[in-house]
Image (cartoon, grey):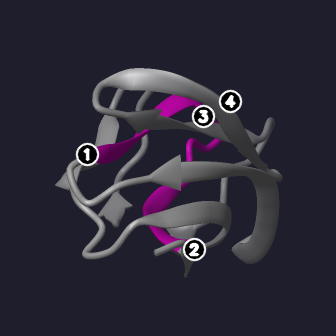
Amino acid sequence: LMGDLEVGRVIGNGYKYPVACKLFGMHYEFLDNSPLGQAVIVEVYKDGVATGVTFTLPAGQLWGYLSCAQTAFTTSNIQTWRVNQIGTDLPGSNLIITPHTFQTS
């Protein structure tokens, strides 16, 4: 999943997992500029509904790994990511998100 940052932007709209699984974390990377001034916050959505799982990507960090509470997805669920907050001095650009999951069936 990849996208530029602005509040309210949906990244990765329409992604379906090929098998039933649980999301347990994500790797992120800003290809151009990391956010400055404040952290970037992204939220996981399932079928257009917020799951309550958010990730805070620290200001000044180009890449990293973050874990979360396990969140189940089936092959019919659609996963998206929503940008809730961007850096104040520099929003961050060309964000790549790689979800980390394990198969459940």
Q: Give residue 88's mark.
A: 4
Q: Which mark is residue 78?
A: 1
Identify the mark nearer the N-term, 4 or 1: 1
Viewed as shown, does residue 82 lie left or right of 11?
right
At label 1, counting other C-alpha atoms closer than 10 Å, the crowd grade (few under 14, some 14-19, many 20 or more) is some
* Element carrying mark 2: strand
Residue named by callout 2 = 101
Q: Is residue 59 left or right of residue 23?
A: right
- The disc, 2 or 3, on the residue closer to the chain's N-terminal end is 3
Q: Label 3's element?
A: loop
Amino acid type, callout 1: Ile
Q: Nearer the viewer, residue 100 or 90?
A: 100
Residue where numbered disc 3 is placed: 86
Residue 30 in view: no
The amino acid marked with disc number 4 is Thr
Q: Which residues are magenta?
A: 78-99
**Pointers 3 and 4 in contact (CB under 8 A)?**
yes
x, y percentage for residue 35? Answer: 67, 51
**Mark 3–mark 1 contact, CB under 8 Å?**
no
Residue at screen point 23% across, 60% down? 16
Q: Secondary structure at mark 4?
A: loop
Give the x, y percent position of residue 21: 49, 67
Rendered residue at 54%/72% (across/down):
104
Q: Is residue 95 above or below residue 68?
A: below
Of marks 2 and 4, which one's residue comes earlier in the chain? 4
Q: x and y percent of residue 70 in the render?
A: 72, 53
| Residue depicted at x 67% and y 36% | 53
Structural distance between the alpha carbons of marks 2 and 4: 31 Å
Q: Position of residue 69 (x, y in %)?
A: 79, 48
